[in-house]
Amino acid sequence: MQNALIDQAASYWNQVATSAEQDLILRWWESPMLRGLVDATWAEATGCLHAGEYIRKVTGRQSLGTGISIGCGAAEDEILLLERGVLDRLIVCDISNEQLNRAEAFAASRGVDTNRLIRRNFVDLEQPLPEKVDLFYWRQSLHHMLDTEQTILWCRDNLTADGAIYCNDACPPNYMQWGDDVLHWVEQYRESLPREYLRSPWQKGEYLPARPAIPTVDYWKSVDPTECADSASIIPAFRKHAPAARIEFLGGCIYALALDDIINNFRAESDLPLLKSAMLADKLMSHAGMNYLFTCVINRRDFV
Ligand SMILES: C[S@@+](CC[C@H](N)C(=O)[O-])C[C@H]1O[C@@H](n2cnc3c(N)ncnc32)[C@H](O)[C@@H]1O
């Protein structure tokens, strides 16, 4: 059963990796303006300019030896860790061959020695790794693991004594089944926008509702059954097994939920102030405990 789910997810991600770029801007990372604001939120939360600096700050180590990125995609951040000397070697793992091809192509484009990259299609999370690693790198992929607490414990057990886990990931309710509290704030935010910002990106003359339609669990299971399959357990698992570790919450209920699809309508430079207000509302929701995304570096020694 698990293999069938993984095969389905792999074919979905092969498709994503090879699909042509589209003109529409539907997600926060596709909008250069919003992405800049989200990157600034990450920098403010961590006090660092990039993941390598954050990893060095929290681990106290300049170079960490071998790292592994599971669900690496194009591995752009991780390959920069090789370039910056934060890692000596990187195991890139993705169930999608097309994503691994992108990672190799990106490494080549940066002139990184390909002997420093080790390509893996699948890592069995029920077996120990052949050798312990110094860094687990999770960027938007831990939330694709089917049992996130077991994955976190498996990482702990496969880390060297002074190794660490880095995350820049998502912690929404499973399959993004947002509750009424978050949806209420999201709806109020969208209602507060001038109507033209709710224009449908697909149908001229149509508008999206103030309360976004939330895809069902069955929908996600039919598209990518790993999508947020057990994402709600990530933060409780870190809190339980590494209670002293610091987790930085990055908000996201506005920029990654309320602005989904309608971000297509914020393209002019003159929209920047409106996006800044959106980030402010997002931050307030984050302070009130409503968070979609988080980041952390957790040392092996932080685990109890
Ligand atoms: C949201 S993408 C993130 C990609 C990349 N880390 C990034 O930040 O751009 C999730 C990735 O996880 C991969 N994935 C899902 N389940 C996996 C598993 N069990 N093992 C390895 N990769 C997996 C998918 O193929 C996909 O490339």
Image (tube, rainbow, N blue to C red):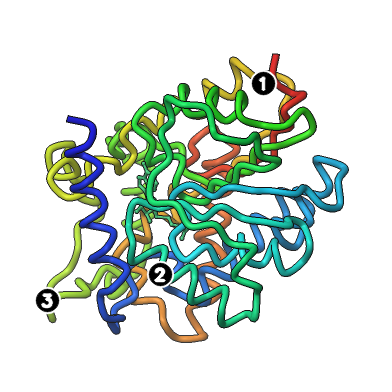
Query: In front here: 147 or 265?
Result: 147
C-alpha gap between disc 1 and disc 3: 48 Å
Name the residue tied to disc 2: 101
Whether the residue under disc 3 has CB within 8 Å of ligand 1:
no
Kind of residue indicated by mark 2: Asn
Q: Within 10 angstroms of label 1, few (less than 14), some, or many (20 or more) residues?
A: some
Kind of residue indicated by mark 3: Gln
Which comes sooner in the sequence, label 3 or label 2? Answer: 2
Q: Quadrant of residue 244?
A: top right
Q: Within 10 angstroms of label 3, few (less than 14), some, or many (20 or more) residues?
A: few
Residue 165 rendering spot, x and y as whole percentages:
64, 38
Which residue lies at the image location 60% right of the left edge and 20% below the top edge?
A: 239
Which residue lies at the image location 45% right of the left edge and 74% below the top edge?
A: 31
Side (left or right) of 102 relative to 54: left
Which residue lies at the image location 36% right of the left edge and 54% below the top edge?
A: 258
Name the residue tied to disc 1: 242
The number of callouts visible is 3
Q: In this view, does 242 lie above or below 139?
A: above
Q: Residue 49 carries which label?
A: none
Q: Is mark 1 on a helix, strand or loop?
A: loop
Name the residue tied to disc 3: 203
C-alpha gap between disc 1 and disc 2: 35 Å
Residue 25 rendering spot, x and y as whole percentages:
34, 75
C-alpha gap between disc 3 and disc 2: 35 Å
Kind of residue indicated by mark 1: Ala
Mark 1 or 2, closer to the camera: 2
